[in-house]
Image (tube, rainbow, N blue to C red):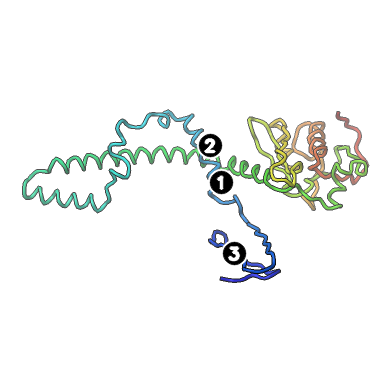
Amino acid sequence: DVVLGPGDLLYMPRGWVHQANTCKSKHHSLHLTVSAMQNWSWADLLDIMIPEALETASAKSVSLRAGLPRKFLSYMGTMHDQTESEILNQGSDSKNDSSENHETSEEEKDRMRMSALQDAFKSEAKKKIMRVCKEAVSMITDGCDQIAKRFLSDRLPPSFTLQEAALTSENREENGGKIFPNTLVRLAKPSLARLVVEDDKAVVYHSLDNSRVFHENPLSPLEFEIDDAPALEMLLTTVEPHWICVQDLIHGDIEEKMDIAQSLYDEGILAVFQQNAPDKTVQTN
C-alpha cells in the first residue's frame, strides 16, 4: 500500500488490479486517472473482425448454415465429457475384461460409441472454426480501418497551432482559398483523417467536427469515386514538413485533382501553400 499526497503520481502497469481509497481527512481529495491503450488491444481488433468474418463466411458456405447433428446434446456438453484419464482407465478395464471374459461389456461399448461421436463432432466444429478464421485473416485490413474509424469517433477535435490554422480554410481570406495545379498541399495535422473503401466508394473520415462532449457529433465522412482513392491516399499521407503539388497527384484528369484537393481543403482538413504564382490555365467549378 502507498499513500499519495498532493502532486504525487503513481504509475500502474496496464491490467494491474488496484483499488483507491480516500484517507480519512478534513480535506477534500480529487485524483485524475489517465489510461493508455484503452480499447486498443488485439482483443478489440478481433472483436470487430470475428463477427464480420462469421457473417461473411456463413453467407458463402452452405456447410456453416447447415443444421447441427440430430441429438448432439445427448453426447456433447459438460455432463457427457470424459477426461483422458477416464478413457485410459476404460481402455485398461476393457483389456482386463477381455482377458477374463473375452468380451466387452455393453456399457463400455456405449462409452466408446459416445467418445467416437464426440470426436467426430469436435473435428467438424474445428473445420467450421477454421473456415471462419480463414475469412477473418482476409479481413485484417478492413478490421484495422474499422478500429481507426472508432478511434476517430472517440477522440477529441484537433487543436491547431496558429501556424497550422493559417494554412487551412479557417484563414481562407489570407491564403486565397483556391486550389490551382501548382498549389502545394498536405494534411493539416497528422492522423486527422483516414481513407477507407466502403461499397466501392473511397470514403474519408476525419475528427474535425468532433465535439469536446463525447460522441456529441457523429462522424461526417466525405465520399469520392473509387478512382479518386490513389490521389486521396497521397493527400492524407503527406504531412508536415512535406508538401505535394496538386498536379503531381495520381489521377488522369487535372481538373479532378484540383476538385479532390479543393473538397478536402473546404472541409478544413487540408493545408495549402502557394509558393509560386497561381497557374490559372486550368479552371474548375
State which tag comes first along the sequence, 1 or 3: 3
125 lies left or right of 27 = left
Q: What residue type is disc 3 on?
A: Asn
Judge by depth and name the residue closer to the eye, 137 or 17. 17
Callout 1 secondary element: helix
Q: Quadrant of residue 3?
A: bottom right
Callout 3 secondary element: loop
239 lies left or right of 181 = left
Real-space CA distance between mark 3 and mark 2, rounded to the nearest whole angstrom? 42 Å
Q: Where is residue 233 in the image (x, y as percent from the top left)?
A: 71, 41
273 lies left or right of 156 = right
Q: Residue at x 72, y 39 (%)?
A: 217
Q: Residue at x 23, y 51 (%)?
A: 86
* Disc 1: CA contacts within 10 A as few (<14), some (14-19) or many (>=20): some
Q: What residue type is disc 1 on?
A: Leu
Instruction: Tell me the quarter of the image containing the C terminus.
Output: top right
Q: Name the residue under label 3.
A: 21
State which tag comes first along the sequence, 2 or 1: 1
Q: Do the residues labelled 3 and 2 touch (CB within 8 Å)?
A: no
Q: Is residue 241 above or below residue 283?
A: below
Q: Position of residue 87 (x, y in %)?
A: 23, 49
Q: Is residue 29 above or below residue 166?
A: below
* Disc 3: CA contacts within 10 A as few (<14), some (14-19) or many (>=20): few
Judge by depth and name the residue closer to the eye, 31 or 152. 31
Callout 2 secondary element: helix
Q: Which residue is drawn at 6% across and 50% down?
A: 100
Judge by depth and name the residue closer to the eye, 162 or 176. 162
Q: Mark 1 points at which residue?
A: 45
Q: Which residue is drawn at 72% across and 32% down?
A: 223
Q: What residue type is disc 2 on?
A: Glu
Real-space CA distance between mark 1 and mark 3, rounded to the nearest whole angstrom? 34 Å
Q: Name the residue under label 2.
A: 52
